[in-house]
Amino acid sequence: MGKLMCVLLLLLSNLFVITASCAANGEASAIGDPGMRRDGLRVAFEAWNFCNGVGQEAPAMGSPRAADCFHLSSKPKHSNTRKHKHKPHHTDTNSLVHKVTKADNKLGVGKPFPGLSPKALNNPDLYAVEKELYLGSLCQVSDTPEPWQFWMLMLKNGNYDSKSGLCPRNGKKVLPFNSSNNFPCFGNGCMNQPILYHQHTTLHKNGTLRGSFSGTYEFNSSTAQNSSYYEVVWEKQIATGSWVFSHKLRTSKNYPWLMLYLRADATKGYSGGYPYDTRGMLKTLPESPNFKVRLSLDIKQGGGPKSQFYLIDIGSCWKNNGAPCDGDLLTDVTRYSEMIINPETPAWCSPTSIRNCPPFHITPNNTKIHRNDTINFPYGAYHYYCAPGNAQHLQEPYSSCDPYSNPQAQELVQLLPHPVWAEYGYPTKQGEGWVGDGRTWELDVGGLSSRLYFYQDPGTTPARRIWTSLDVGTEIFVTDKAELAEWTLSNFDVILT
């Protein structure tokens, strides 16, 4: 898209609610920080237990939400109108004025802040939700036609204590129960939140900006070799290039299932997997088929054979009748499409396991190939498909998605590199984009997601596929031993086509 077209889109936005940012090359971007090039970074952190709740805060850590947002000034400032609230870091020519203080990030249950509702004050789950909104208000960037807040770093613990009663089943509250071997858990407390260390972004003499979040799930140990560990370091040279986010994630015996993603979430409303108001980077919600994603990804270590590394993971929510989600957990369904690029990830979908395949595959020219067509169906293109647990008209045989790991029912379409995805710019063979093959990708995510199978009740109006979350990262899925994944991500953009 040329510069003239981008200008026209922005002019039209005043009339038709077409929301876009213009990247440096004139393309229309759906996010507030196209290509991660804005010096004044906005980044936040969120941690979850198995079903996207908090349950209980980690000792002395506060609610598991934090942010690092700052304004870069070209002139030194020696005073601040908000005394004792935001202290600038100084250099000879530039200064950083942080919008979020250490005290803001340490806020936890029982501690009030502006806008906190009485019902959330002592409820860890509700408190985290409203703390995200508060941090978003501190980080928010005014823009036309919509403001935006931050990139989101999401950390999730896959342990589930079925005796805790914390997680609903397909949105319905259930009593505690005994689980034989379905979920990892070392015992009481296995769903805990992590320790969080935060190095505020600082400006170094060579013009480098750098900050980080890091920590562990083990309370009684440091980052020793046998402990879980996560780290995200962001770094950029002033006035040039993209922010580079360097990630590390290590599992341990007690925490064998961990997830770490960098997300572009909706700036308001629901995001993928979350039935409440969120904050993020997507000031325009991209709709299939009219968007692409550009990103640079360099994987240093893969995380072992169980690492379901997502080149791109997109999430949204709509009901089985095609209507948008409205917060009714019994009828809402989170929908995910995920491209896994770990070459050790097998295709669970096969001619002998068609229950793990979508009912049909749709080609770029919109031809449907049914999964029982053993000559033409591309079984190797699908790791796993699972249907929503609240669907009423499923085609036999089928596999139902895990009913506990989201607050509502969910549907997964997990893809693998395969020649059938070449039309969309996705990897076509195992190993592409993996360790030692860092690349800049331009993926026709909108085009592909418009042709994926998602369940819908017969005779209902097809849902609009509007995506509220796009992310990159890994889900290290129940490892047998400690595994380490390490990768860098930069130049992330969502381009409206």
Image (spheres, rainbow, N blue to C red):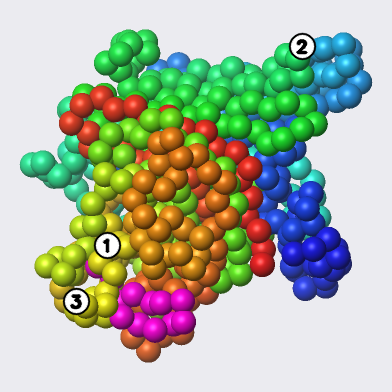
Left or right position of 319 against 227: right
Amino acid tagged 3:
Thr
| Location of residue 363 in the rendering, given as x and y in whole percent from the top left corner | 41, 77
Left or right position of 130 against 258: right
Between residue 322 and residue 330, name the one nearer to us. Answer: 322
Q: Are marks 3 and 1 in contact (CB under 8 Å)?
A: no
Which residue is disc 2 drawn over? 205
Amino acid tagged 1:
Gly
Q: Are marks 2 and 3 in contact (CB under 8 Å)?
A: no
| Location of residue 468 in the rendering, given as x and y in whole percent from the top left corner | 54, 57
The nearer-to-camera label among 2 and 3 is: 3
Which residue is disc 3 drawn over? 374
Q: Residue, x 24% and y 57% (percent of image)?
A: 347
Amino acid tagged 2:
Lys
Work out whether 163 lies above or below 327.
Answer: above
Measure how far apart labels 2 and 3 are at the Cα level: 62 Å
Between residue 420 and residue 81, name the one nearer to us. Answer: 420
Between residue 492 and residue 55, name the one nearer to us. Answer: 492
Q: Residue, x 81% and y 67% (percent of image)?
A: 5
| Residue 62 visible at all | no
- Please tell me whether the stretch drawn in magenta is mainly helix, strand or loop: loop
Q: Please tell me whether residue 424 belongs to the stretch shown in magenta.
A: no
Q: Which residues are magenta?
A: 357-369
Which comes sooner in the sequence, label 2 or label 3? 2
Which residue is disc 1 drawn over? 380
| Location of residue 385 in the rendering, given as x and y in whole percent from the top left corner | 28, 63
| Location of residue 397 in the rendering, given as x and y in whole percent from the top left corner | 15, 73
